[in-house]
Amino acid sequence: MAEMFSTLGTWNWLIFGFILMALELAAPGVFLFWLGLAALLVGLLSFVFTPSWQMQLLMFAVFAALAVPVWRHFARGATEASKSNPFLNRRNEALVGREFTLEKPIVDGSGTVRIDDTVWRVAGPDAPAGSRVKVVRADGASLTVAIA
Amino acid sequence: MTGFDIFAIALVLLVIVTLFAGIKTVPQGYDWTIERFGKYTRTLSPGLNLIVPYFDRIGRKMNMMEQVINIPEQEVITKDNATVTVDGVAFFQVFDAAKASYEVANLNQAIIVLTMTNIRSVMGSMDLDQVLSHRDEINERLLRVVDAAVSPWGLKVNRIEIKDIVPPADLVEAMGRQMKAERVKRADILQAEGQRQSEILRAEGAKQGQILQAEGRKEAAFRDAEARERSAEAEARATQMVSDAIAKGDVAALNYFIADKYIKAFGQLADSPNQKIIMLPIEATSILGSLAGIGEIAKATFGESAASAAAAARRGSVPPAGPTPPPPVPPQR
């Protein structure tokens, strides 16, 4: 065991890094890549000076932990709603801002509108059937409307 | 191996395990709920997400795509006590992963049972005929009821469709017979109506024909009568004129007319090709006697020359008195 770690060297770190990066492609999770990057960094630093194998392991651990905030910084754009289809799986949010005709009057704060051949329940100020309403907020399956 | 060695190895393992636990990739179409010490805190949307390891835990992986579930077959008794077998499908989509995860246990089962009971109540309030012909209305009513019922669960039922409505076999057979009987009845009625119509048309045609014929006859009779009236009038006028003439002149003029007509008639008799024996009434001969009067009139009118010419003509063509039977002619064949 100790020998396995003590024989860790520059080249091994680099190889380990590439293997991790390749594994990332095989099993996407996007953090094997960062571990690989950490391993590469350890390998490159081993060229500059020759840390003990324990030091190398600690450096790897630190770089791996540091990768998280770095990765978050770069990944921020990606985790936000995708640009080409921001409402994928969020049909309710796509309705915000659109105007519809009340199918049933809003009584005591709830009524219905017909959208895309199905019926949506809406909440809002009381209004007679047939009046135009505008969706101002989508909260789950219920839409909040204002009179347009 | 020193403690530091073990520490270094353990730290690397810890970091790697922590990273594995803290970095979560949520695939598109899913929302994951996060529980901190077992209590729901937030929802992860698709993409890369970080959670705090050791505190946070992935709760439910909620499918946010529209899903379809089969509503299993069930027997429904309609208002008029027919038992039909019904099944269907329901389409729903989760919009609030937290509610769908924690407000209801076994979401699909809940939707299925809810839909099934509502199918029973909606279809149980309708007659079999209505059930079979008002599928849209059933779907609509189901959708409203079920959608309202599932709203606390953060999901929306977009559509409920009744797939099959199967009445029992004997009922289907009876319905088939009923339909056939109805068609046969319609055909019979149509045929009878056609016959009636044609009979009526025919009778009307005959009636019209007779009326037209009668009208024709009436018209003809009117015209005939008119003609007779006219001829009578003309006759009367002629008679009047003759009598006027007589009144003004000689009675012998009358004899002229009679003799003239008589001779013409006689001439016609004589011309008859197959009748050469002519019987004349005795009185007729006396009429011929009046011809003598004609001569006198002629004498009075045209003078002596005309009288002699008339006498000559008399000698030639008309026997002086009495009919002389013409010589017998052998039959032509």
Image: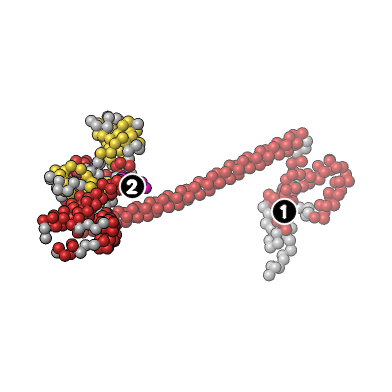
Whether residue A48 appears in this view of the structure is: yes
Q: Check disc 1 and report its element: helix, strand or loop.
A: helix
Type of amino acid under label 2: Ser
Q: Which mark is residue B286?
A: none
Q: Which mark is residue A82?
A: 2
Is residue A82 within the magenta segment?
yes
Residue picked out by circle 1: B266
If the image is split into quadrants, where does the N terminus of chain B sit? bottom left
Please give left or right for residue B71 compared with residue B248 in the image: left
Nearer to us: label 1 or label 2: 2
Where does the image place residue B75, in percent across and percent down from the top left? 17, 53
Q: On what subunit does the disc labeled 1 rest?
A: B
Whether residue B239 appears in this view of the structure is: no
Name the residue at 12% across, 45% down: B38
Where does the image place residue B310, in percent across and percent down from the top left? 83, 49
Quick check: B97 above or below A132?
below
Q: Residues within 10 Å of mark 2 (few under 14, many from 20)?
A: few
Tell me where the magenta segment starts and ends, as one range: A80-87
Please give left or right for residue B168 compared with residue B292 in the image: left
